[in-house]
Image (cartoon, grey):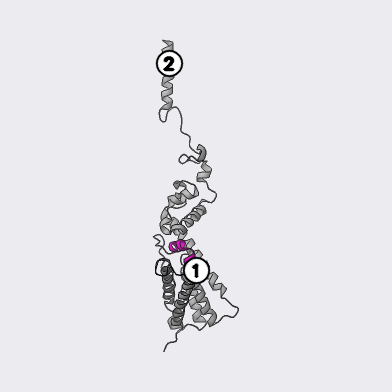
Amino acid sequence: MADVEAKTGSSTSRAAANEPGEGRTPQTPAGGGSRPGRGKGGGAKSGKGAYHHGDLRNALISAATDLAREGGPESVVLRAVARRVGVSPTAAYRHFAGQAELLHAVKELGQERLARSMESGGHATTSEADGPESAEARMRALGHGYLSFALAEQGLYRVAFCRDTLHLSPLDGAFAPGKAVPGSDQEDGANWDFRSFGILVSALDDMVEQGRMPPERRPGAELTAWATVHGLAMLCLDGPLAGASPEEIHVVAERAFDVLIAGFTARSA
């Protein structure tokens, strides 16, 4: 009888140990959250590596930017970005509430890179002696800088101008010369949302100040200029100019800028 009871007790103990929540407590990673995934070789990934990345937000933006370069805005998917960085989607959601926030961060970066490309072209034409010719040359160089970025960074360029459901900033300076424009140097706390537009506004204002552009032609000129260069960029990316050589595109761009500047600088009758 004692032997039977001992065997029965042993079996009961083993059964209790196998019941969920009984006999043993599941181990929780340090810092809480779900269990870490298994890495190569079957070892568990540490909680620190999975959830406490040294600079996870910037790592996510960098990975999202790479995806944007490869496939445009449709490729910026939060789960895919988390996978590329090597963290769980839960960890990524601690930095971005959703895909829209991540896309906005990449969009802002794209606008920053576009603005820097424009400024680089504009600075290359800057001379010690400012004047009407210098203002016109800068305007032309900004257009080439814009176009160069669009062609070199096609996916990121598309993200820079994709529809942003989180931030739909109005172009407050589009019809009022001298009024602060979102993203321009004129505005305190400027961001990169429309920095490219702000650069264009400043260049047109300079053409007026240097006497190259009649003041009456200034209102709304930035939208005309922006539509010209952006439309040209899209023709080169998706339209009939997609197969054109760099030399052919440069010729087309120069002609477009000739016509645009001629209209801006024409004297009233």
- Residue type for callout 2: Lys
Vertical side of 197 occupied by 102: above or below = above
| Residue 53 vs residue 237, the one in the foreground | 237
Q: Quarter holding the N terminus?
A: top left
* Circle 2 residue: 7
Q: Amino acid at mark 1?
A: Ser
Quadrant of image for the C terminus: bottom left
**Is 63 a magenta residue?**
no
| Callout 2 crowding tier (Cα within 10 Å): few <14, some 14–19, many ≥20 | few
Looking at the picture, does residue 86 appear above or below residue 214? above
Query: At which x and y percent is residue 40?
Result: 51, 40
Question: Which of labels 1 and 2 is toward the front?
Answer: 1
The first of marks 1 and 2 along the sequence is 2
Looking at the picture, tell me which residue is in the foreground, 16 or 186: 16
**Which residues lie in the magenta part?**
148-160
Residue topped by disc 1: 148
Badge 1 element: helix
Residue 123 image-quadrant placement: bottom right
Q: Which mark is residue 198?
A: none
Task: Tell me if label 1 and label 2 are in contact, CB under 8 Å.
Answer: no
Point out residue 79 in the picture as x, y percentages from the top left corner.
43, 50
Outermost bottom residue? 269
| Residue 191 in view in this figure | no
